Structure formats: structure tokens, C-alpha cells
Image: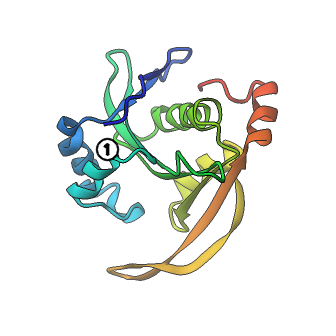
Amino acid sequence: MNAAAPVDDTRAAARVRLRPTMSSDIEFVLSLEQDPANLPFITPWERTQHEAAIRFPDFRHFIVEGGPGLDAVGFVILIGCRSQHQSLELKRMVVRSKGEGFGRAALRTVKRVAFDSLGAHRLWLDVKSHNTRAKALYDSEGFVVEGVLRESVRTSDGFVSMVVMSMLQDEFAARRSQSLELVA
């Protein structure tokens, strides 16, 4: 299990906190991945992959807690936390309640964890090209498109392209100095 303490952000209406995922959270995580609203946009993992990610030091697997009661509203996985290249991947971010600000608040918290706590130079992700909602969020949050991995993921309907996006530490610092990194 990751020993990191919860990262709390209480400055916004969409109150969000990240806490390390525990084995008892795996059913919740799997249910979010299997939700028909999320399946078109992610490649679900098996239980053993999530269990390994909780234990492996190079990963950070978090439960996103939000709202007035800080209920579980999603999860986040970071990979490369011990990378000598200081390049972290936002492997997955899934929130249950869309349109309530939890995704944006969680993403901003993830950026602070990556750059401030884990010392990242670069935070990157890939997003399925048809996931316009997530792509728009990443665009609005300062991620830069690096390229497209054409038809790189096989689905039941054929192949899907992945858009690779990233943010560098100095870009994050510039956004912070412009007060663009406050939780929305």
C-alpha cells in the first residue's frame, strides 16, 4: 500500500481529496471501470493489476473523495513515480458524477501531487480521440498535445487513436503564478 497521506483541497465548492487506495476499495474501482458510461473511454484493468498498483512503489493509486461528506467519487492512477526521468504518467482518472467539478478538482490536485510532492518534470497522459469531454478538460487545464498514436488501441468496434498530452513543471508554475491552479 502507498504510504502517502491524503491530499486535501478544501478551497472550492467541488471539495476533493485524494487518499491512497486500499484493498477494500478495489470493488468500487472495478465498478467504475465497468460502468457503461466509462467503458468507451478506458481500457479496464483486471483486479490483479489494481492490487499490484496499490503495492508497487512506482505507482500511486488514489481514491478521489469529494463533496460535503468526502464520499468516494472516483479514482486516479499515476505511474512513473520513481522515474529517473521525472516523467509521470496519469494512467487513469475516472469520476462517477460527471459535470459536478470533481474531475477538474481531482486533476488540479493530481498536478500538485505530481509536481510538488513527487518532483515531476513532466506529467503526461493519453486520451482516446473520441473522448472529447476529457480532451477538453485537459486542454483547458494547460496540457499540450504532443501527438497522436494512430489506431493504437483495439476495441470491439475496431481501432482507436490516442492523443498524447503533457504538461511540464515550468508550465505548471506559470499557471500557478497566474492563479490558474486554484481548485475550481
Q: Residue 21, image x and y in percent?
A: 31, 36
Residue that appears at 71% across and 61% down? 145
Where 28 sits versus 89, above or below? above
Q: Is residue 124 left or right of residue 76?
A: right
10 Å crowding of disc 1: few (<14), some (14-19), many (20+) = some
The secondary structure type at the circle numbered 1 is helix
Residue that appears at 67% across and 54% down? 166
Viewer can see residue 100: yes
Q: Is residue 181 left or right of residue 42?
A: right
Residue that carries the numbered disc 1 in the rendered image: 55
Q: Nearer the viewer, residue 184 or 55?
A: 55
Kind of residue at disc 1? Arg
Quadrant assignment for the C terminus:
top right
Viewer can see residue 64: no
Q: Is residue 3 left or right of residue 87?
A: left
Where 182 sits versus 88, above or below? above
Q: Residue 143, image x and y in percent?
A: 69, 50
Q: Quadrant of residue 111?
A: top right
Q: Nearer the viewer, residue 174 or 23?
A: 23
- Residue projecting furthest to the front: 84
Q: Residue 20, image x and y in percent?
A: 36, 32
Quadrant assignment for the N terminus:
top left
Q: Residue 86, image x and y in percent?
A: 65, 48
